[in-house]
Image (cartoon, helix red, strand yellow):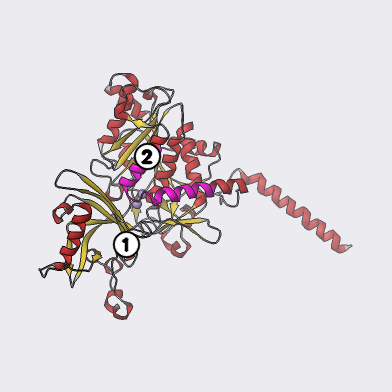
Amino acid sequence: MTEKKTDKAAHKSKADREDLKKKYEHLLNDYKNIWKASSDEDRKQIFDFANEYKKFIDSAKTEREFVSEAITSATEKGFVDIKSVKALKTGQKVFASIKGKGLVLAVIGKKPMSDGFNILGAHVDSPRLDLKPNPVYEEEETVYLKTHYYGGIKKYQWTTIPLSIHGIVYLKDGSEVSICIGENEEDPVFYITDLLPHLGNEQMNRKGTDIVKGEDLNVIIGGIPIEDDVPQAFKIGILKYLFETYGMTERDFVSAELEIVPSMKAKDVGFDRSFVAAYGHDDRVCAYPALATILEISKPEKTCVCMLTDKEEIGSYGNTGAQSRLYENVLAELLNKQNGAYDELLFRKAIENSKMLSADVSNGFDPKYSSVSDPRNSAYMSHGIKIEKYVGARGKSGTNDANGAFVAEVIKAFEDHGVIWQTGELGKIDEGGGGTISAYMAQFGLEVLDCGVPVMSMHAPYELISKADLYHTYLAYKAFVLHMK
Ligand code: MN
Ligand code: MN
């Protein structure tokens, strides 16, 4: 008897506790794990989207390849080069290549463009090794390429992994040759050596930045000499191969744009396949859902734009980076071709009325390295798209601090459309920091907010993301372009 009574009491108090918890729930801001809240159907969509993503990024490792693959996909969906269009109508789909390294895609909305554009902006360059202008040399009967790293990398991570060479060479006769070696199963790869631990005493006592020095990132590209007994016979052996295969000579390296990237393919991670490891998630894991979004839109209210920029990893400089006015020119051309004439003030107003998501990755909280992050202000893997009101470093320096009213509007659009989101900062105060394209775009006067997928091991040759975050980032970008007023 007594026992039964206690049971009932315990049961009642548990129900009371639940009620009490519910009573105050609306006061608290709780962030959810997507897997915990997902049905089998949700999970199928998450996994299917990740499979498409992996396929795409395996064939688009550099900014040029991303732009070219994006144009191919866009053309299949009815997008045409803006150059071929005289007047733009509602529902029309156009693209403009920014010198083959950046891309603007647009779907023309029902409203006049002077009401503003809804813009998704991501970058398609990733950290990598570029070549020095005089890269080829022979030492101890081995042939190497001298490289100059591009973007912020931990240099020691780029040794002893399979590397591929991607890019373009401009020949003396004016023709161009595309090169991509190291991606197919039967292709050779390229390689940077490291010191054996047996003799690594001095090296392992160096500072992390000097464990492998920039001048040591030399890539092995061959080791068989030509038959003739001449000086540099090994180097000539490789130059002869390059001439016979591509028609290029040593001189053509000066103008070539060849990039050394990891040759690993994107792979599922974990027994449950919840994560994806790949080269260059930063920022293709945001660029891809932004592209997927623009490719499936038809007849939106406002004109929707997807802007894929280059050079973000080195400060968005150059005429293909986000600081270039070529991107602005495309928006002006859109307005011009809708209105039939160009009106500078109308264009300035169109930009001012525009709303943009700066789609870029941020760090995912890593419990192994928790000391660099504030756990209450961090993005967690599988907790959805990360909103960052501001980025920057040392007292928010160098950031676009998004306007509160706009942040509130974006969050509402996300929540109205089932997007799971979270927020946080990039690490603890004064621990470091980072920048994105948002500060440059804000100069136009448009509203812009940083948000994207949390990444672990960011800028490593093989980075990690959660499939759930990727999918909710796609949902977020779609909610934004379609529903921002
Ligand atoms: Mn980035
Ligand atoms: Mn980056």
Tell me the residue at 81%/59% (across/down). 7
Tell me the residue at 49%/36% (across/down). 479
Q: Main secondary structure of the magenta part?
A: helix
- In this view, 330 is above or below 430: above
Left or right of 441? Residue 473 is: right
Marks 2 and 1, how far apart in space?
Answer: 27 Å
Q: Nearer the viewer, residue 5 or 360?
A: 360
> Can residue 444 be seen by looking at this rendering?
yes
Q: Amino acid at mark 1?
A: Pro
Residue 63 colored in magenta in the image? yes
The tally of labels here is: 2
Residue 418 colored in magenta in the image? no
For the residue with label 1, is its CB less than 8 Å from the closest atom of ligand 2? no
Give the SS element for disc 2: helix
> Can residue 39 be seen by looking at this rendering?
no
Give the SS element for disc 1: loop
- In this view, 252 is above or below 442: below
Residue 45's label in the rendered image is none
Tell me residue 478's x, y (percent).
Answer: 48, 37
Magenta stretch in the rendered image: 46-73
Mark 1, residue position:
188
Residue occupying the far left of the picture: 230
Mark 2, residue position:
72
Q: Amino acid at mark 2?
A: Thr
> In which quadrant of the rendered image does the N terminus lie?
bottom right
Tell me residue 173's x, y (percent).
Answer: 14, 45
Q: Nearer the viewer, residue 208 or 82?
A: 82
The reply to whether the C-beta atoms of the residues labelled 2 and 1 are less than 8 Å apart is: no
Left or right of 483? Residue 148 is: left
Q: On the image, which quarter does residue 176 sit in?
A: top left
Tell me residue 185's x, y (percent).
Answer: 38, 59
